Image: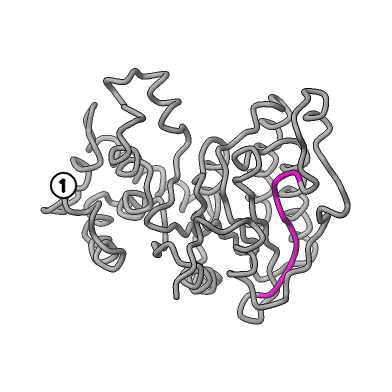
Amino acid sequence: MKLSFAESSARERLAHVLDAGSFDEWLPPSARVTSPHLAQLGVPSAFDDGVAVGCGRLEGQPVFIAAQEGRFMGGGVGEVHGAKLVGMSRRALRDRPAAVLLLADTGGVRLHEANAGLIGVSEVMRALLDARAAGVQTVVLIGGAYGCFGGMGIVARCADCVVMSDVARLSISGPEVIEESAGVEEFDARDRALVWRTTGGKHRYLSGDCDLLVEDDALAFRRAAIAALSMHRPFTLDALAAEHAGLERRYASSAPGDDALDLWRKSGIERAAEVPDLEVDAVRALRAPAAAALAL
């Protein structure tokens, strides 16, 4: 029987991914480390500030892991939330676990905390890159109902490996933000099919923004996390330059107003209109020619 990763809470996802009974939480709710800002605004706080952080084992290997709780303020990153993520990556520099894993479920910065949230996300990004530069494997798993948006979308792409489900979403700007800034004619946030074609796991996988695509199944995410432990991506200036060149080629091959369907066709997928309805295995089979065409 499959267990939906998207419908699970943050701590349920931790239990699904890690070896049974191995999670040891740092600053649990009993420590009551809460946001210093929300009470001043009259907004309810959470005793874990919307993220569970700690260590555990994955297939017997020691890992540091964090899971964001989208059900609390959309998984938004505030001062304490961000500090817990930063502390995890900083501790990884000292203890050198097999990997640092982030189970992302977030809309990005917690707007209630304004600059504190923005600074928090930037510090999370730097800490994750520092861990990666030190040789610690970094993995982001995206399968929550809130997706991975805003600054945390950038954080995800800083990792060695990104795992997504076919119902997950990854982007910098959310649908409503795009519509507000560009107009409904450019992007209709109410068009759910358009939203998933643009930000969903299938498109991110075919475009090379996601390394592993899985079904919305807890066991599938655990297996992907185990596989990701050995999926190191070179972190050198040459590797970054090559990735940047690939992004430039992708941009040059697109035209204003291109839909994901157009991009899929340009990548050599003849029956692009069928992609949204394909099963995960069928989408995986399309990856090689699509990636080659996009030169990623």
Residue 95's quadrant in the figure?
bottom right
> What residue is rendered at 38% in x and 42% in y?
199
Magenta segment, principal secondary structure? strand
- Which of 55 and 34 lies nearest the eye of the viewer? 34
Classify 220 as above or below 88: below
| The furthest residue to the right | 31
Q: Is 265 on the left or on the right of 87, as rendered? A: left
Q: Position of residue 135 (x, y in %)?
A: 64, 63
Q: Which residues are magenta?
A: 49-57
Is 122 magenta? The answer is no
> What residue is rendered at 48% in x and 63% in y?
4
Residue wearing tag 1: 265
Q: Position of residue 253 (x, y in %)?
A: 22, 38
Q: Secondary structure at mark 1?
A: helix
| The furthest residue to the left | 270
Q: Is 65 on the left or on the right of 278, as rendered? A: right
